[in-house]
Structure formats: structure tokens, C-alpha cells
Amino acid sequence: MRFANLKIGFALTGSHCTIDQVLPNIQHLKDEGADITPILSPVVANTDTRFGKAEDLQKKLLYITGNQALTTLEEVEPIGPKKLFDVIIVAPCTGNTLAKLALGISDTSVALACKAQLRNNRPVILAISSNDALSTNARNLGILLNKKYVYFVPFGQDAPQSKQTSLVAKMELIPDTVLEALSGRQIQPLLVSY
């Protein structure tokens, strides 16, 4: 069991169309021994979309992980002082969250959880899913690629003909990215084809 006794904070942000690709990886990490606590951005915690209801997602995450999701600033604040997690994964990581992390803004549960984790020099893994990663958010992506203790799940252009500035991580590479990040390395190759 590659992840036995590993404490993971698994944060989901509002790329609702990508969440179904993320859930099997949460199950995979759990099946291999990880203790996973979901962390939800306000959009994910409270917004019903054509991809599903927020309440149903929270129930599904509780079923998979056995832990109630953290959804408020007050609930995630202890992550730093209590060193609650060995690693935090943000998957999917929207362009909005990418920008907040690059600029040091911590006004959501996910952004504050990441800030708290980085305060302890512990890894934060980002699985990007953003339609503007190669335009407005390209600068923020560059900043975070150079930030210590921040690692990326390999990503590529998911629809270069119709969405030229979009990048999406290969979510199935989340477990391997965790192993590399725990050893202080960025998994390679970082750029992959879709």
C-alpha cells in the first residue's frame, strides 16, 4: 500500500466538468491506505450545476473518504498550526484558485488550506483545469511553477483547436505525482499530450 498512513487534504475547486475525473483518484488513494479529508471551495460546496448537486458530491466524498468535507475558513485554519496533512492536493485547480495562490490571496477554504500547508514547508499539488491557463493565467502558472513546495500534476492542452488557451491535468497521474512530491521532486514530463 503506497499511501499507508499518509494524511491527505484533497481540495476540489469549481471546474465542475472535471470533478468526475478526479473522484476515481480519491478512491485510488484511499484504497492504497491514505487518510483523506476533502476540502471544498465555496463554489463546489454550495453550487448545483448541470454536472450534479453540491449535496450529492459531499455525500459521495464522505462515502469514499469517511471524512466530512472542510468548507469554511474556520475549519481549515488549524491545518497550519496543527500540521494536519502530509500533502494537499488541489484537483481540479481552477484558474481562479491558481491566481489566488500565485498572489497570496487566502480568502477561500482551499486557498487558506494551501497557505497553511506551505507555511510548514509541506507539499501542495495542483491539478490544473483552466480555460485561460495559457492567456490571463499564464503569468500565475509561471509564478507557481517556480514556487518551492508547489508541484503540478502533468498537464496539456485538452482541446487546442477549440480552446487554444485551456490546460487540463492528466488526473490519472495524481497518485504518481504525490509520490514524487513527497520526495521533493516534480514528476516528469510535466507537459503531456492529450
Image: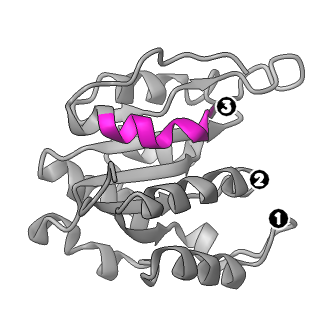
Residue pointed to by mark 2: 17
Q: Position of residue 69 (x, y in %)?
A: 46, 79
Magenta segment's dominant SS is helix
Q: Nearer the viewer's eye, disc 3 or disc 1? A: 1
Q: Position of residue 11 (x, y in %)?
A: 46, 60
Mark 2 to mark 1 CA distance (whole Å): 6 Å
Q: Earlier in the sequence, mark 3 or mark 1?
A: 1
Q: Is residue 1 left or right of residue 184?
A: right
For badge 1, the amino acid type reads: Phe
Whether 113 is among the magenta residues is no
* Quadrant hosting residue 179: top left
Check contact, mark 3 vs mark 1: CB within 8 A: no
Residue pointed to by mark 3: 132
**Element type where label 2 sits in the image:** helix
Residue in view at x 19 percent, y 75 percent: 78
Whether residue 61 is visible, yes or no, is yes
Whether residue 12 is visible, yes or no, is no
> Which residue is more in the foreground, 122 or 171?
171
Residue pointed to by mark 1: 51
Q: Position of residue 71 (x, y in %)?
A: 46, 77
As drawn, 41 above or below 187: below
As drawn, 6 above or below 54: above
